[in-house]
Image: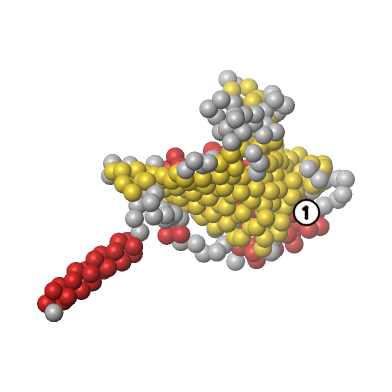
Amino acid sequence: MFEKRIVFFVLIFFNTLTYGGFVDITKEELADICEVMEDSILDVTVEYEFIVDPLPEPRPNVLVGTGPEKIKWTGAKPFSELSLFSCDEILKDNSGKERSVHISTSYNGKIAKKYHFEDQPARKFSEGVITNNKKLMPRWSKTPLIYTSHFFQLISGRPLHQILRGKDTDLITLDNEIKEVNGFNTIRVDKYVRIEGTKAHSKSIYFSPEHNFTIVKIELYNGKQAVVAYDVLELKEVKDGIWFPVSGCIAPSSPTNAKNIYKATSVVINQGLKKEHFNIEFPAGTQIFDETVGLRYVHIILSLVLIAVAFFIIRRITNKLGRVR
């Protein structure tokens, strides 16, 4: 159903482009398209690399990354409630010693879990946490949703289509002139806020008409100048009419701050995932702190316990039979 609605909008606006000119579209029509696109992705699984450029310098008592983080993230609507995240990376200390680190987190709207494993030179270390606090969810800047229209729902609690239909029409402006941004032909929406009766620039959002008005850049302003940009560098059509960012960069305005680079190798949407999917299982031997009940314990796989109990019972029976003989 979503794909049909998206194709419908593509057909409507296919002939509106005049290269080097303008796109004949209103804010209300753009809001309609954004609403369809926001509804089109019910769940998504992305495998990708997350790179900090440049890498941080080693410091005393601080572990730093040595290269890209290998990440797999799955989310489902509501994205702020359903998340499954895993990350593998190599860290090193200021002496140059390296260790491999794996972190997994899950949140199903009620219970959050975290598993942390380190393969250190001298020992292996694993611990788990269970809590009812969603603080263990990954930072949105570390997920690809930050490059999409879902950014606004996650950050401000309001979907983009509602923002575009705002009552204060003077706080939302649409520039229909086509300009090239990040290698895409784009149109731009500027959002303003009122501060002591004065309009202050808040955000600029760039849409690619040739990709069904998918967002390819979001800039955040402090009223006068941009402070950070979320740049989409490549899009992939993951279903008919549905484009998803597979390469992007978060670029702070200050050249002294590092960039965050995102490169996806796989994107799958609308798998029909249920709430039960968003859970991690702790390996045997994990030291767990369960904040929900205030207990610390070592996780033991139930099947191993049952095998040990069965072995003990069989051995007792065998010994008794031996004595009877």
- Quarter of the view holding residue 296: top left
The outermost residue toward the bottom is 325
Q: Is any part of residue 32 visible from this angle? A: no
Residue at 23% from the left image edge and 69% from the top image edge: 315
Q: How is the image coloured?
A: secondary structure
Residue 234 placement, left or right of 87: right
Residue at 65% from the left image edge and 48% from the top image edge: 49
Q: Is residue 237 above or below residue 287?
A: below
Residue at 78% from the left image edge and 58% from the top image edge: 14
Q: How far across and down, in percent of the image, does residue 221 sit?
A: 66, 29
Q: Is residue 54 above or below residue 129?
A: above
**Which quadrant is the N terminus positioned in?**
bottom right
Q: Is residue 272 above or below residue 300?
A: below
Question: Mark 1 falls on what kind of element?
Answer: helix
Give the amino acid type for the residue marked by disc 1 in the picture.
Glu
Residue 54 placement, left or right of 81: right
Residue at 59% from the left image edge and 36% from the top image edge: 97
Q: How far across and down, in percent of the image, does residue 207 sit?
A: 72, 46
- Quarter of the view holding residue 261: top right
**Mark 1 neighbour class, 10 Å CA radius: few under 14, some 14 to 19, many 20 or more:** some
Q: Is any part of residue 105 visible from this angle? A: yes
Q: In this view of the protein, which residue sits in the foreground, 21 or 281?
A: 281
Q: How far across and down, in percent of the image, does residue 236 sit?
A: 71, 56
Q: In this view of the protein, which residue sits in the foreground, 231 or 241?
A: 231
**Which quadrant is the C terminus positioned in?**
bottom left
Residue that mark 1 sits on: 210
